Image (cartoon, coloured by chain):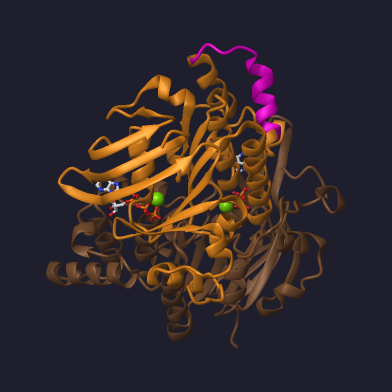
Chain colours: A orange, B brown
Amino acid sequence: MKNAAIHLENLSISYGKTPVVFDVDFWVAEGESFALVGESGSGKSTILKAISGLAPDWTGKISVLGKPRGHAPDREFAKVCQMVFQDPYGSLHPRKTVDDCLAEPLAVHGIGGRDTRVKDMLDAVGLDQRFRFRFPHQLSGGQRQRVAIARALMLEPRVMLLDEPTSALDVSVQAEILNLLKKLRREQGLTYLMVTHNLPVVSFLCDRMAVMRHGRVVEIAEVDALKTGRLSDSYSRELYAASGGTLQPA
Amino acid sequence: MSAPLLEIENLTVTFPTSRGPVDVVKGISFSLGRERLGIVGESGSGKSMTGRSILRLIRKPGRVTADRMTFDGIDLLSQSERQMRELRGARISMVMQDPKFSLNPVMTIGEQIGEALLTHKKLPRSELKARVLSMLEAVRINEPERVANLYPHEVSGGMGQRVMIAMMLIPEPDLLIADEPTSALDVSVQAQVLDIIDDLVTGKGMGLILISHDLNLVSRYCDRILVMNSGEIVETCKASDLNQATHPYTRGLLAAMPRMDENRDELPVLDRSTWTTGAGT
Ligand SMILES: Nc1ncnc2c1ncn2[C@@H]1O[C@H](COP(=O)(O)OP(=O)(O)OP(=O)(O)O)[C@@H](O)[C@H]1O
Ligand SMILES: Nc1ncnc2c1ncn2[C@@H]1O[C@H](COP(=O)(O)OP(=O)(O)OP(=O)(O)O)[C@@H](O)[C@H]1O
Ligand SMILES: [Mg+2]
Ligand SMILES: [Mg+2]
């Protein structure tokens, strides 16, 4: 896979003695948007954590933009690959304002023009400037999630790992974020690996998806198979039907 | 139907900001019987603040005022903090929007659910454990024995939500306020968990306030829906009529949802200028 932005081979992940992900194999092309869907607790977040160095207990191979990934967090890696966490409360520092949170990655990497960049980014994620000096607890759930997305975008990474980026958002803000993600991808060729349980979101933003259950990938499908209800695995079809889709023969 | 379970009149929630006090909930009124009420609305429109103020859980420097706020004949506004603590959990419980933040990080999942049960009912240890495990099973947790021994940071997002739901349901409250309770769940587990809540509403006469941004979900699981926008209720409708909603704001929300056979290049977003009533917050 020469042009793979992310390549996972035989990836198995555990927490201590508990294995939770088994033999996962897939690749995501540069500029592609790939979804990871499936059962709650099946290991989706764990895969993203392993790629970003936060779940060190894995075997197999992980490479990002052609470079094999080690087992520990890595600062240079953060510049090309950023993660948005599922739980925005946990990922935002309670005593840092929105402004600190967005300017900090720039400071760490010695990037200038911080004031303008922070302002522009707030606009981009649809947050009014009046939120700039607030603390996380002074924001609603959806506002916090937009801060988390904004922070990940500050370093202009090439690969984004997005864990349920819009599940805490109402549909209007979700639409704005999805449009933004699509635009960034079109203009800057970003690659997304996105966890979501919302199949229509996959239809809108993604090219392919992997369906997970009990720690394994049970199906990898093109988005067209999703749009037309022609998924083949029985669990994928169950998810599709539960989302209100009308099944067709695989 | 008898007297309503919950009556709210002219509820206002105010926060001081650098630009002076701001009302994030602006004098709303509604009542709830032993029914299922959905609250939908844009991010920041005041849904969580409305839910939290019923339990008097608005943190300082926020301030809550209302002309009337009664639950089953009890005047919530005049209850002491100690009396409120007795109501919370036992008779009114709330599933918070950030489950992991609301769980105790140094207690295992099993201990927390057990404690929620014990505060309202004395049980022998062995029976307690059995009840905890059966509750975890009821919210569709695989391997309940293993999960009961995990700490909150060791469970997935959707598992955390289900643990929170289990904790809030185990004392069988009269009123459940559920703030985005299933936003991290895959659709098939989501349906199963909402069915459990539904059984309590129909079987035990529990009242439900379901706060969610998922319009399909509220129209399926609620009887009535309130639509909020910048601190106000802009529309009330029967859940089954949500698709025929008339307020431009509600119509905008419906249009912004992607569809399974989505082919649009861009999703329509709300044109806030047409209906915004003010600066909001
Ligand atoms: N720090 C940890 N220690 C031990 N086990 C963990 C830890 N984090 C996650 N797990 C376990 O790993 C499994 C997979 O969790 P993961 O968070 O990857 O699921 P998920 O697919 O993202 O689910 P969801 O859709 O609910 O977020 C779960 O059984 C969970 O209990
Ligand atoms: N401590 C605070 N100081 C000032 N404003 C606050 C504070 N806490 C919350 N707010 C504001 O109150 C408004 C209502 O918040 P609330 O949490 O009720 O929104 P919500 O409708 O639940 O949104 P979401 O769907 O994003 O969860 C928001 O605009 C938020 O920024
Ligand atoms: Mg997860
Ligand atoms: Mg909220």
Quarter of the image with the C terminus of chain B is top right
Is residue B254 depicted above or below B101 in this figure?
Answer: below
Q: Main secondary structure of the magenta part?
A: helix
Front-lying residue, A235 or B243:
A235
Please give the name of the residue rendered at 33% of the width and 36% of the height, measured from the top-left corner: A62
Is residue A248 depicted above or below B143 in this figure?
Answer: below
What is the magenta range? A109-123
Residue A110: say if magenta: yes
Please give the name of the residue rendered at 55% of the width and 48% of the height, measured from the top-left corner: B58
Residue A81: say if magenta: no
Residue A156 position within the rendered picture, expressed as x and y whole percent measured from the top left: 57, 26
Q: Horizontal placement of B29 versus A88: left or right?
A: right
Please give the name of the residue rendered at 22% of the width and 64% of the height, measured from the top-left corner: B143
Residue B180 position within the rendered picture, expressed as x and y whole percent measured from the top left: 52, 59
Please give the name of the residue rendered at 52% of the width and 20% of the height, measured from the top-left corner: A104
Indicate the quadrant where residue A211 lies.
bottom left
Quarter of the image with the N terminus of chain B is bottom right
Residue A36 position within the rendered picture, expressed as x and y whole percent measured from the top left: 44, 52
Q: Horizontal placement of B238 versus A197: left or right?
A: right
Front-lying residue, A42 or A125:
A42
